[in-house]
């Protein structure tokens, strides 16, 4: 048996780094990527435009409903006032003497140089609010009078937590007056007889 060995040097072929098939695949990949990016951009732009349009429509609808919202709020406030008036009338019906005594107590605590322009009871919050005018005298300044009124309210068991809402000075031809409002809690139980006792 004979084995023939070729010992002559043979030139080694360099491998091709990029062949035609690879180039074609690369071109297809780039084309696909560009196509997907372009498609995605178009889709996103379309969605953004749609959302902007929807946003504009919602804004217009809100502007159109603004007057309706104000009217609803006004009606809600009116309904609340009506409920308070109904409750007040019910309380008056059940215990008319209580409110009569309450008004009498207000007359007692008012200094002589104070007169009322309005008196409102809120039976839900159990508060009384009155608007009044105080006239300055030679012996008593208007703000001093308001302070005395606050002290009278605090010392009366029918009232609690008096708060002055404001005081506005007015000059009436040499007479100094102050317009002010005052709110306080009232307690109708102060006029009702204790169990086994009699009312005051």
Image (spheres, rainbow, N blue to C red):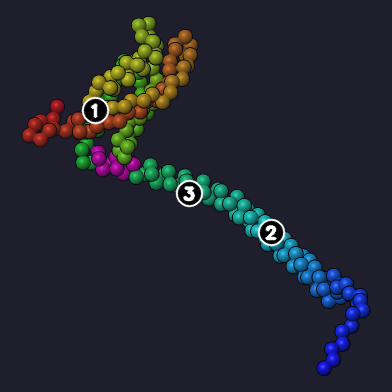
**Left of 73 or right of it: where is 132?**
left
- Image position of 4 with respect to 85: above or below: below
Q: Which residue is mark 1?
A: 158
Q: Is residue 91 magenta?
A: yes
Magenta segment's dominant SS is helix
Q: Quadrant of residue 141?
A: top left
- Image quadrant in which you'd find residue 166: top left
Residue 117 visible from this viewpoint: no
Comparing 156 with 96, the one in front is 156
As drawn, 93 above or below 160: below
Nearest to the eye among marks 2 and 3: give it: 2
User: How far across and down, in percent of the image, does residue 199 sit?
Assistant: 13, 30
Q: Residues within 10 Å of mark 1 (few under 14, many from 20)?
A: some
Name which of mark 2 and mark 3 comes first in the sequence.
Answer: 2
Disc 3: which residue: 72
Q: Residue at x 32, y 31 (%)?
A: 128
Q: Residue at x 35, y 6 (%)?
A: 139
The N terminus - image quarter: bottom right
Q: CA distance from mark 2 to mark 3?
A: 35 Å
**Of 103 and 181, the residue lying toward us:** 181
- In the image, residue 36 sits, relative to residue 92, either above or below, namely below
| Residue for point 77% across, 65% down | 38
Expressed as whole percent of the image width and height from the top left, the position of residue 126 reads 30, 35
Q: Which residues are magenta?
A: 84-92
Quadrant of the image containing the C terminus: top left
Label 2 crowd bin: few (<14), some (14–19), many (20+), radius 10 Å: few
Is label 2 or label 1 in front?
A: 2
In the picture provided, is 166 more to the left or to the right than 42? left
8 in magenta: no
Q: Which residue does the numbered mark 2 point to in the structure image?
A: 48
């Amino acid at each position: 048996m004979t084995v023939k060995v070729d010992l002559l040097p043979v030139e080694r072929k360099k491998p091709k780094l990029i062949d035609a098939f690879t180039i074609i695949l690369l071109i297809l990949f780039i084309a696909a990527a560009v196509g997907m990016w372009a498609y995605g951009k178009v889709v996103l732009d379309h969605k953004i435009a749609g959302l902007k349009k929807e946003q504009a429509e919602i804004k217009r609808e809100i502007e159109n409903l603004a007057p309706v919202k104000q009217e609803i709020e006004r009606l809600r406030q009116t309904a609340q006032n009506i409920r308070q008036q109904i409750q007040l009338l019910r309380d008056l019906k059940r215990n008319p003497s209580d409110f009569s005594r309450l008004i009498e107590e207000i007359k007692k605590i008012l200094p002589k140089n104070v007169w009322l322009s309005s008196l409102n009871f809120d039976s839900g919050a159990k508060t009384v609010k009155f608007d009044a005018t105080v006239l300055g005298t030679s012996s008593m300044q208007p703000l001093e009078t308001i302070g005395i009124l606050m002290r009278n309210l605090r010392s009366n068991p029918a009232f609690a937590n008096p708060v002055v809402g404001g005081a506005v000075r007015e000059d009436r031809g040499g007479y100094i007056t102050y317009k002010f409002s005052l709110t306080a809690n009232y307690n109708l139980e102060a006029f009702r007889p204790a169990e086994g006792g009699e009312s005051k």
